[in-house]
Each structure stands twice: as structure tokens, then as C-alpha cells.
Amino acid sequence: MLEDAWCELCPEVEVERFECLESQKETRATLNDEQEQIPDLSLTVKDVAIFQNQTSMSRVEGLALIRSLNAKQFSVFYHIRQWCLDRANGKNPESLKVFITGGAGTGKSHLIRAIEYESKRIFSPICQHPDNICVVLTAPTGIAAYNLKATTIHTTFCIGKDVRLPYTPLGEEKLNTLRAKYRDLQLLIIDEISMVDHNLLSYIHGRLHQIKQTGDFSPYGNIGVVGVGDFFQLPPVKGRALYCDGVARSLWSDSFKIVELTEIVRQKDSVFSQLLNRLRTRSKGIPMLAEDVQILKRCETGEQSSALHIFATNNQVNDYNMSQLLKNCPDFVSIAAQDYVNDKKTGKLKLLEGSHIKASNTCLTELLLLGKSARVMLCKNVDVSDGLVNGVCGTVTEIIMKETKKFPEKVFVRFDDDFWTNTSI
């Protein structure tokens, strides 16, 4: 667009100009003056309704977020923004495939929020209905999705836990629901993509291919994809990382352009941030610097600390958990797992004996030791939108037992996040 030519020459000045003009518009509205129409920023009443339905961030907050980007972040932001403008104006630009990487504290999540906000602002006017989704922000784990106010990949695209190839197409009923929901989808943002394996990426491509009904030669249903993450961090669980050879190689390494953020903006201690970067890229067998070892030793707390501990094996985890339970909860109770099924003869629930041994893909133990003041952690996503996700920690505040005193009726947990009050399970 001609009005965006100046943005390419002086992007930061243009953002400041937009903010000034936005402030002038608000002043004119107060004085009942005629508002100045700014190309690419002015929205009709219908467009504003759709945009407000897509995001909770105001224009002033969005501009402040964009202005806070550094030079490298802004270059990536503007490249994706230009693609969104071309797509919204029907110019049919080349397919967008970008991988944004960088160490901890380089502002990847900050950049994601700016991209999500601006892309929704651009695409929302071309949505056919206010409830239609034009930009999807997703992540492979519940806690990552909750931190970004996003949804998990499995929930977004109706993908089950057992992701096996060859790809299993979605049934017509669920597919029609997804088609109605994502009929205006233009951009997909995947955070923590280092934990996405080849199989899961193939399923994302397959779902988008089904939803958009595109040809076999259109990766991801001709939807723009932005992957964000750090391959030096956690790899996929029981899967092959995307940088390894695999079935989805053509969907990843042959398609995505890589952009690395290097400026650390979150860690104010430059010495410690440099240490973290050396640990991030250190290979096995290479000795650490003596000064790095000394700095890390000053952070030691000891095994008696209440801080979260990480062990190499499950047996070590169980031993430590048991010692802490005996120390903090002398009046603990033992809760045996119970599994019920419908009895075909009576139509009532029937307790199964020994079913836990045969169960697969379960996150439950056969015997749970629990007590008041015990520290607990969710090991399954219960409700991502409410923050009840895998990895959230809390403290048991009360256990109400049934009359038989063999199984609890309710367990109250106070989670560490201040947002939570007592939650009944």
C-alpha cells in the first residue's frame, strides 16, 4: 500500500506518528469534532466490534507494546505486518514461514504479543463474523499456553494424545465445527516449538489442509505460520525434534526462514545473563568456566530447602516426596485408586479390581499419600483457560473424607498463583 511506504523508510517515527494521531482523534471526539480518517488505522463500527472481540488490548496499549520493541524485534514484526497487509488486501503474497529463536530473556514472548495484536487488527475487518478467528496463538503444553493466554495445539486442532502416523483424518462432524470456527484463519503462531515433534507437526499440517481444503502442494493449508522457540531448551517428549531428520522435514527445515534474537532484554544482570547463554550453548564434555561454577554455587539452597527440586530418576523423586510428606504431614492418609465402569446388566457404576495395572497413558498412581499442608502438583491439563495446567503447584488445605473413611469426598488445594482461592477437587 502506498501509505505504508514511509513505514518501510522510518518505522519507529511512523509508530510515534500513529500514536500522536490516535491521541488527536480522541481529543476531537471529546470536542465532537470530525475525526480524521487515517488509512490502515481507521476502522468502521463493524470492524471495531470484530477487532474488540478478537483481543482485549486497547489501541493505546498495542502502540505502547509495539514501541517497546528493539531494532531486531521490530524488523521481524514489520516483515510479518507487511505480509498481513498484503494478504488482507488480496495481493496473494508468498507463503509466510518464519522461525523466531533466541536464548532466554531475548523477548520472544514480547514479540509474539505484538505480532498477535497487529495481525488481528489487520485481519479482523475481513472476517465474515465477529466470532470467527483470524489469528491463532497456540503452544504444545498447557502452562505455556496459559502464560500467553493461548490454547494448546491438541485442543486447537482436536488432536488426541496418541499422535501416530500415517495421519488420521478428522471425522466430518468435528471437521465441520473446525471449518466454521477457522474459516477466516490467516495466521498461526506456535510458541515453544522446540517441544513439537515431527508427528505433531504433520498433524497440524493435516488439520489445516482439511480445514482449508487446499491442494497437496499447499503446506499448512496456505496459512501463514510463525514458529517461536529455542531448540537448546526441552526437546519433544518421546518424539524426534524438528531439527532431526524425519517425516516432516519438508514441512520444517525446507520451508521456514530463521531469525535469531540476540539482545537480552529481561536479565538486568549482564554477568549472570552471559553465564546463562554459555550454559545454553555448552556441549557435553566441555568443562565450565571456574567463575561460572562459583556463581552457580552461590545459588545453592540445599536439599532441605522448600524450593522445587529436580532429580534424574523417578525413584529419587518418590524418595524425596515421601521424606517431605512424613516431615510436613504426619497425619497423612493413603488413597487407593478406584476405577468405575458401567455395568451392562444393572446400568450402574461398578468398581473394577486391579484395573490400574492394565491402564495405559494414565497419570495417576495406584496409591496416593496425601495430607493437610502437603505440596502437590497437577500432572494433567484440567482447564487451560483457568490455569489448571500440568506443572501448577499448590498446597492442600483440607481433606474431607467420606463416611467409610477410605476415600476422600473433597480435597481443597490453594494454588501458588495469587489469582486462585481454594479449589475443590
Image (tube, rainbow, N blue to C red):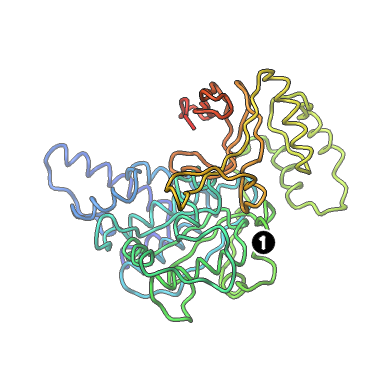
Tell me if 106 is positioned left or right of 138 in this view: right
Tell me if 96 is positioned left or right of 289 in this view: left
Q: Residue at x 79, y 34 (%)?
A: 296
Which of these two is toward me, 85 or 22?
85
Q: Is residue 359 above or below residue 210?
A: above
> Can residue 86 be seen by looking at this rendering?
no
The quarter holding residue 276 reads top right
> Can residue 282 be seen by looking at this rendering?
yes
> At which x and y percent is residue 151?
46, 51
Tell me if 149 is positioned left or right of 310 in this view: left
Q: Is residue 371 above or below residue 295?
A: above
Which of these two is toward me, 297 or 234?
234
The quarter holding residue 213 reads bottom left
Type of amino acid under label 1: Gly
Q: Residue at x 46, y 63 (%)?
A: 79
Disc 1 packing (10 Å; few <14; some 14–19; many ≥20): some
The residue that mark 1 highlights is 239
> At which x and y percent is residue 144?
54, 46
Which of these two is toward me, 164 or 249?
164
